[in-house]
Amino acid sequence: MTVQHDHKGAKSAGENPQGTLSVTDDRTGETYELPVADGTVRAADLNKIKAEEIGLASYDPGLVYTATCRSAITFLDGDAGHLAHRGYPIEELAAQATFIEVAHLLLNGELPKAADLKAWERAVATGGTADEHLHKLVASFPRDAHPMSIMLSAMGALPAVYPELAQAPADGEPDPRPARLIALGSTIAAMAYRHGLGEAPVAPDTELSFPGNFMSMMWKKDGQPYEVDPRVEKALDVLWILHADHEQNCSTNAVRSVGSSGVDPCSAVAAGVAALYGPLHGGANEAVLNMLREIGDVSNVAEFMTHVKNGERRLMGFGHRVYKNYDPRATIIKKYAMDVLDIADGSPLLDIALELEKIALDDDYFVQRRLYPNVDFYSGLIYQALGIPSKMFTVMFAVPRVSGWVAQWMESAADPEQKIVRPRQIYTGAPTRTYIPAQRRD
Ligand code: CMC
């Protein structure tokens, strides 16, 4: 969640002072004045509070209450259910922009002017050709490999296959890597899909839109022209706008954390893919579909909910670390789910999802814990209606998120306040002891 109250742009340290926090250390009787700025106190100021030699540190598993960076990319107010990229509300972007415009906005701070948009679209359209090493890498996986595993490996392999992606451009030169990474992410995702079907990869079609090209790389039949269905193309574009960036979530934090070592952007993005794979994060969309299939029928919903409330199960696609009102992306996605599922003649699982949501929104367990549908509750249903298998759902999340990860990596790399990430721990292990050779151990 964004803690900076005035989010008009990136600020330097302490630019929004809000007074001080007076702290008296009962251990020493000393009083300290800690500056408060942007709704935070600096951990370095806490560290000046000392009873012994080591200063105070904060303990925050999951970094729930810790701001780790300043960012001008995404603003998120979880209590109000508000999300905006570079100041533009997500509702406006989803209704009017294209994903490729939003990617430009995240990376460069502004929506592109018409001529810049053409150049940017071209750079992404022409940046996704995979060479033979990438083909061989994907082909080397077992046919039933999870496509996220393939994507993770292939993103990590990019600096070896294309060494230029590991090199920063010369001073003053434009950086071609964001366009290449976004384009290659979509090529790799489509290759992983076709590998699972035992089909050869399809080369990118540079004349198609970003989602249209992805559809062609997934579904084009050998030797036949590919006809893009504009309704599917639009649905994908909207879903990808909603998934492009989401502030300091688990995978973005992984990208920034790994990137802080100075590694190239492909390796940092591979760390993001790994984090996204987990069922509590991007893997939730696949888990939702599995859950709906397991429930099987509306008549089984009440019993499933009893297991959830007993703490034996999680209602996948519900709850969020920062949204405690509603997830604005879920509202947009639900509308799209209705439209798309209508196109695709309905889904037997939609009735189960609607019943789960109805019960949850009315039930004390969920109301008290402020658990609402998140972006993943309906996205899987849409992907399923578009003919995409559930194993691919998290990959479909990763394709657009590459734009957010790269934007966050770039911002972090340019931020003079950032350092290599190296948190503290509270050691709970054995005290210092002496090594005993194996023969003398009891
Ligand atoms: N079903 C049932 N109970 C839940 C759920 C859920 N989906 N989510 C949270 N709770 C309960 C949890 O058991 C706890 O109860 P209690 O206070 O009695 O112990 C309380 O709500 C707080 O939960 P928490 O785990 O401390 O909350 P968190 O902020 O650490 O976790 C979350 C956030 C998203 C990991 C969690 O809500 C969850 O596991 N949801 C299901 C997975 C999911 O849909 N993930 C996608 C997130 S959105 C897409 C993305 O950007 O990743």
Image (tube, helix red, strand yellow):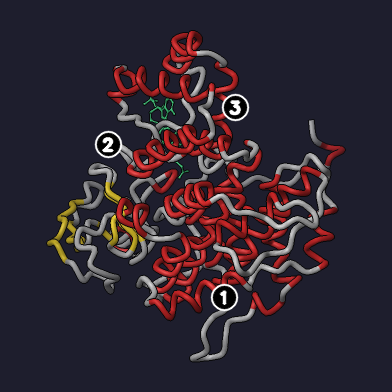
Q: Nearer the viewer, mark 3 or mark 2?
A: 3
Q: Find the distance from the CA under tag 2 to the CA under tag 1.
A: 39 Å
Between disc 3 and disc 2, whose residue precedes? 3
Q: Residue at x 28, y 24 (%)?
A: 368
- CA gap, disc 1 and disc 3: 37 Å
* Quadrant observed for ligand 1 in the rendered image: top left
Classify mark 2: helix, strand or loop. Answer: loop
Q: Is residue 431 visible?
A: yes
Between 306 and 219, the residue placed more toward the observer is: 219
Residue under pointer 3: 290
Residue 56 visible somewhere in the drawing: no
Which residue is at 42% across, 20% downward?
356
> Can you identify the residue that label 2 sits on?
325
Residue appearing at x 43%, y 56% in the figure: 245
How crowded pointer 2 is (Cα within 10 Å; few <14, some 14-19, many 20+) is rated as some
Side of 184 where 24 appears, left or right:
left
Q: Earlier in the sequence, mark 2 or mark 1?
A: 1
Please state the horizontal and vertical placement of residue 51, each as a whole percent of the image. 31, 54
Q: Amino acid at mark 3?
A: Asn
| Type of amino acid under label 1 | Ala
Q: Residue at x 54, y 21 (%)?
A: 348
